[in-house]
Each structure stands twice: as structure tokens, then as C-alpha cells.
Image (cartoon, helix red, strand yellow):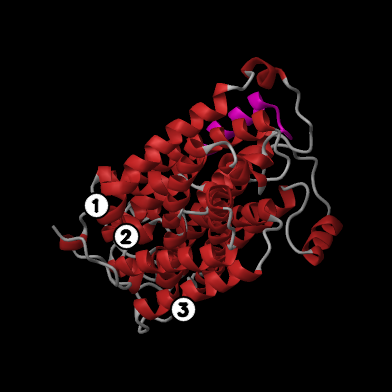
Amino acid sequence: MQDKAPSWGIEPVPPPLRVLGLADTMLLWGNLGVSLLVLVAAAFLVPALSLRDALVAIVLGSLIGNLMLGAAGLIGADARVPAMVLLRAPLGQRGSYLPTGLNVLQCLGWAVFELIIIASAATALSKELLDAGATWFWTLVFGAVAATMALIGPVGVVRRFIRKYAVWAVAASLLYLTWWALADADLRKLWDAPAEGGSSIWLGIDLVVAITVSWTPLVADYTRFSRDRRSAFLGAGIGYFVAGTWMFLLGAFLVLSRGLADPAEVPAAVAAAGFAAALALLAVTVDEADEAFANVYSTAVSLQNLLPRLPQRLLVGFVAVLATVGALTIQLRNYETFLLLLGSFFVPLFGVLLADWLLRGARYGPDEVFRGPAVRPATIAAWLAGFALYHWLHVPPLGPSWWVDWVEAVGQPSWEYGATLPTFAAAFALAALAVVVERRLAPGRLRVE
């Protein structure tokens, strides 16, 4: 059975390497959903929201985000190419370079955040169990682990690591941590406790969707190895939904029942809860390495859309070193803003991709991906219009101070229902209109360079 596809480039994956079935794909995305970052992100939902409102935001946000994730995975399995190469179809050969650059920054940012969280959890554990910290040491260790996994490749990671070991250890750990979080909690009191304010259900949904949708620009890097479109759609969508929702709910109960005010306190609180809780956190921490692996691997694969002749192994090594250095030097700040900014770029981008794919007959072949026009200005404009709409609707504005000042100067509507769904719908509609107009004005342009 073939499990060695670590360095496959940007060409369509051949049938012998498309070996990830439904169970494999579900295990991969389930493990990616078991994330300390998701656990920590729950602290941005509660106690700003009541527990009841937070549950609504988590479930609805997870449903919406995972439908998008599953659909993006299906399109990737259809075209059998990496995600940023896939964007050559809706945006053009060189038009795909802009989202590629953004995705490289996104994946690097995620890799840095993952290593920071992993090292923080490992430090808390080592202090509790061994009376020694050394955050820098754990950062280097897990940076090396992420690099090794990225060199093995997604098929090997699933077959050699997740299916044999990680799934069992993580399932047992999550069951224990869930029991520990709920055992001494006064559920009636938590349910009746009022919100402290500062957020809304719609902003909570936006946050949950943003975390999930942050995977749509790289899901095809992995589902290109899926056996078929069904395995990709159900495996990615269901796998991440179950695990991600579980982690959000677990994090919300931990924050409320333990009175944690700072997201960074969550791993330390678990580590201090006793030997069994520490062991469970250790299993989840080790499993977190697959999130760091995914971001290192996808950064390298994305760079190959710009630099296809560079060896993937060289790019993996470079990205892993860069992410590790970033984790050693960057402080964890403005995490929530970072997550929502991702949604502002990639929610409308997925709307454009989905509209173009559907209007091409729900199929992408090599001609659409590799032999289309250099740039498709209309669909790029649809994407950027969606981005602008996201920021116009999102209150308060997101981004650097100069951008926030500009958005406030333009003026924002009294809109309290989140920016994600309107942005996706607008980008989808504008891109569909652009494709229809392109076909009428230049019928052959979409297929001929």
C-alpha cells in the first residue's frame, strides 16, 4: 500500500497516490480539529457570551464553516492539485499569486501560533511533572517534529502516525478532559449565568467560522490525495466538525467552570489539575504537532505555486526554521483579531472559487487549472469586493490602525448580524455574474491562454 507521497509537486496527483479513503480523511481532519488553539479560542466566546449563546454560536458556526471546508475539499479532490494552484482556475495563472502570498503569510502565522501554544502547554506540563520549564527547548523540539512530519507528507502522517497511535490516545484524553471539566461544575449555575458583554452571537459565529474557514485555502493540499470527491467532502467536513465542536465546547466549559480570564491560562490550568489531567493534556499537546505540520507543509506547497522548480523538501526546511524562530520571538497578542482577519480574506475567496467551479459544470480539469488566462480581473474584483464588504460590515473594524481609521471615516452601517454570510453571498453572486459576462463577451477565453 502506497503511503509515500511527501514531495509531490503542483501537477495533478495520479491514481496510485490517491489512497486516502473516507476513514483516512476523517481521521486526518478530526485530528486537525483537536487543537489547543481551538480550546484557547473558546475564551473569546465566554464569558462575553452566556453559555447558551456560546453553544448556539459554536454549533451554527461549525456547521457553516464545515460545509465550506467540505466543499473546498471536494473541489480539491476533483482537480487533484494543491489549493493555491487550484485558484489559477477562478483567478488566472498569475492572478492566483495574490492569494498565494496571503496564504503563505496565513500558514506561517498559524505555524507560529501553534508552536507557541504547544510550547506553552509543554512548559506547563514539565513544570508540573518535572519542576522545569524551558519554553525555548519545547519550541525547538516541536518545530523539529513539525518539520519531520511535513517531510513525510500527508499520506504517511495519516497511515504511520494518526491511524496507528494518535487517534486512540487523543480520544481517550478528550473523554477524560471532558469528564474532568464537567465533574465538579455546577451546570445549572453556568447555564443561568448572564453574559458579561462585549460580543454577540453573530460575532461568535464569525469567530468559529473564521477558525474553520482558515483551513479552506489549504484543504486541497490534502484532499488531492483522497480517493474520490465523496471521501474528501464527508471526511473533511464531518471530521473537523466533530473534533472542532468538541474542542470549542470543552474550552467554554473549562473557562467558565475554572474562572479563567486569559486564554493563555487554559493549558496551565489543565496541567495543574493532577497527574491524569496532565497526561491527557500531554497527549493533546503531542497531537497538536499535526496542526503545526499542516501549516508548515501547506506553506511549502503554496510557495511551489510561485516557485514550482524549487524542491519541496528545501521549502519545508526553510519554512520550519522560520516558524520556529517566529515562535521563539513573537508574543501571543491580538489572536482574535488575527482569526477574524483571515475570514475577511478567505470567506469571499471561497465564494469566488465555488461560483466559478459550479458554473464550469462542477468540474475542474487540467485545462481549467493550467491553461486558462493569465489574469481574470472580474473574478479578482469580486473577491476584493467581498473583502471590502466584510470590513465595512464588521463592527468594530479590524486591522492596522490606518485601515481602521479609513473604514471608520467611510462610515459603517448599524449591522449586528456578522460579516461572514453576507460576504460569502456577495462574493459568490459577483463571481457568478463575472463568469457569465466573460462567457458572453469572450466564449473561448476561459480555456485558452
Mark 3 — residue?
A: 318
Q: Position of residue 232 (x, y in %)?
A: 31, 48
Within 10 Å of the Cα at label 2, are there few (<14), some (14-19), or many (20+) other Cα atoms?
A: many
Please tell me which residue lies in front, 433 or 281: 281
Q: Residue at x 30, y 66 (%)?
A: 152
Image quadrant where residue 85 sits: bottom left
- The amino acid sitting under disc 1 is Leu
Which of label 2 and label 1 is nearer to you?
2
**Compared to 197, does 285 lie above or below?**
below
Q: Position of residue 75 (x, y in %)?
A: 35, 54
Image quadrant where residue 50 sits: top right
Please tell me which residue lies in front, 238 or 10: 238
Q: Quadrant of the C terminus?
A: bottom left
Q: Quadrant of the N terminus?
A: bottom left
Q: Is residue 413 left or right of residue 89?
A: right
Please tell me which residue lies in front, 185 or 68: 185
Within 10 Å of the Cα at label 3, are there few (<14), some (14-19), or many (20+) other Cα atoms?
A: some
Q: Position of residue 281 (x, y in %)?
A: 49, 44
Image quadrant where residue 223 sits: bottom left
- Residue that sits furthest to the bottom in the current view: 309
Q: CA distance from mark 3 to mark 2?
A: 18 Å
Q: Which residues are magenta?
A: 47-62
Mark 1 — residue?
A: 20
Q: Residue at x 53, y 48 (%)?
A: 129
- The amino acid sitting under disc 3 is Phe
Mark 2 — residue?
A: 154
> Which is more N-terminal, label 1 or label 2?
1
Q: Position of residue 46 (x, y in %)?
A: 68, 34
Q: CA distance from mark 2 to mark 1?
A: 9 Å
